[in-house]
Image (cartoon, coloured by chain):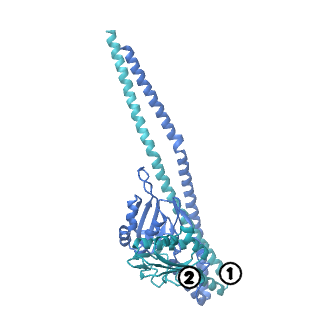
Amino acid sequence: MTGNSSKTVRNIAITAVCVLLGIFISIQYKSLSANNAAPSSNEDRLASLQAQQLRLIQENENMRSEKEDLEKKISELENATNDEQIDSLRRELDNIKKFAGTTTVAGRGIYLSITINEQMREATLQRHLLKIVNELKASTAQAISFNGERLTAMTEIRAAGEYVVINGRQHSQPFEIYAIGNPQAMISGLYLSGNGPLADLESEGNCDIVCEARDTVTVNACQSGDINTDLISNK
Amino acid sequence: MYRKNTVCIMLVFLLLGFVISTQIKSVAADRYGLSAAEVSEIDECEKRIQELTREIEDTKAECAELKDTYNAHLKELYENDQQFYNLYKKYETDINEYKLYAGLTTVTGPGIDIGLDDAHRSSESLPAFIVHDIYINELLNVLKAAGAQAISVNGQRIIPMSEFLCLGPSIRINNTRLFPPYHIYAVGDPDKLLAAVRDSVIYKNMVSENLIVDPVISQEITVNAYNRTYTGYINMLEQYE
């Protein structure tokens, strides 16, 4: 009799402890999975805040340059003579045209001529040409023409069959590039002691390359209609 | 029998003690340890955003005032020296037109937003691929060929001499370091741009390398102005006579 009732009490006690244990384990599991979720949602929040911050930094820069622009204009209107003002405006217009590529320019630079003497895959040729032009841009080039096509911000270099399409027009070999900039910097960028894009092309394919520094090269303006703006409007 | 039960209960209590201690530890870590750095980073970011917002508001107000002064001056010119006023206005109109051509103004229009990111690193068996400079170069080339009229990468406006260079996990455009994820904004005919991207060899290559490439059409894409001084890009160029 006593043995039986003490056994029941013990059984109840064990059951209670087990139930408690079960509850704890489930809480623990839940809290662990919540912990795993927390950092990733924090990361997301941080990423979106950082993106917002970046946008605001850009907007801030835009506003500041607008303010400087206005201050300069007002100061000129107040202090400069009419001739000085027109001179300054003309200079600004000329500079913007040079930057956009809508005016023919001259200066120190390089001449580069490439003739490829074997069949080359379109994608391979295109990649070589893109890398060569990119290297020129990265090493001080300020104006580039490719078979007479001025490279603007939206100029494509697309290999298509035996042609290369630039500014929407087909060009064939030899590929002739004029670039204004520091000749030594551009040439060493193109070869990079054997690792540059021109060195790559030379080692990969059977081709004739002429690459020389020149005291004066001329880079012509883009053609009217090469820069399209019908879909964009100032904000 | 009695012994056996005692041992059993002892084991259960031991387990219980262990579970309770881990629970307390994990809760404590959650509150004070792990997230503290993140929380402070978030706080800092929010503070900076507030500061920036205030700064922008201030500059806006200043600009409005300056604009009034400027307009008053022009009105004066118009009344006193109409010939000069006309010449001034002509140059100003031309400058604004060429600024649009040169990428010196912030523009909007229809287009696409291409999200780019390195391959997911969760699949340990695959090597992690990163977005290389040449991929962005090729992708932008596709957009240009498809008639894009303005492009930016992470807010950097693509200008005629924009370069693409790899710098470890980041890339350099316009002498500025950019980190993934990248967003390419391009204004142009959205359907044409999207089709050109999807049909391109480079897109297929990037997808096959598990890189994230996510082109989305939008009726309003904003492409930032090139917002630094451009004199460093023209100081070697002489006007050709």
Q: Is residue B89 visible?
A: no
Q: Residue at x 56, y 71 (%)?
A: A189
Q: Residue B155: x, y in percent?
A: 50, 66
Disc assigned to residue A79: 1
Instruction: Left or right? Give the position of A118 relative to A77.
Output: left
State whether residue B80 is above or below residue A210: below
* Parent chain of label 2: B
The disc placed on residue A140 is none
Q: Quadrant of residue B218?
A: bottom left
B41 sits to left or right of B147: right
In this rendering, the count of numbered labels is: 2
The N terminus of chain A - image quarter: top left
**Colour in which chain B is shown?**
blue
* Mark 1 vs mark 2, CA separation in Å: 18 Å
Secondary structure found at label 2: helix
Image colour for chain A is cyan
The secondary element bearing badge 1 is classed as: helix
The answer to which of A18 and B97 lies nearer the viewer is A18
Residue highlighted by disc 2: B92
> Is residue A82 positioned above or below B168 on the image?
below
Q: Does the image show residue B154?
A: yes
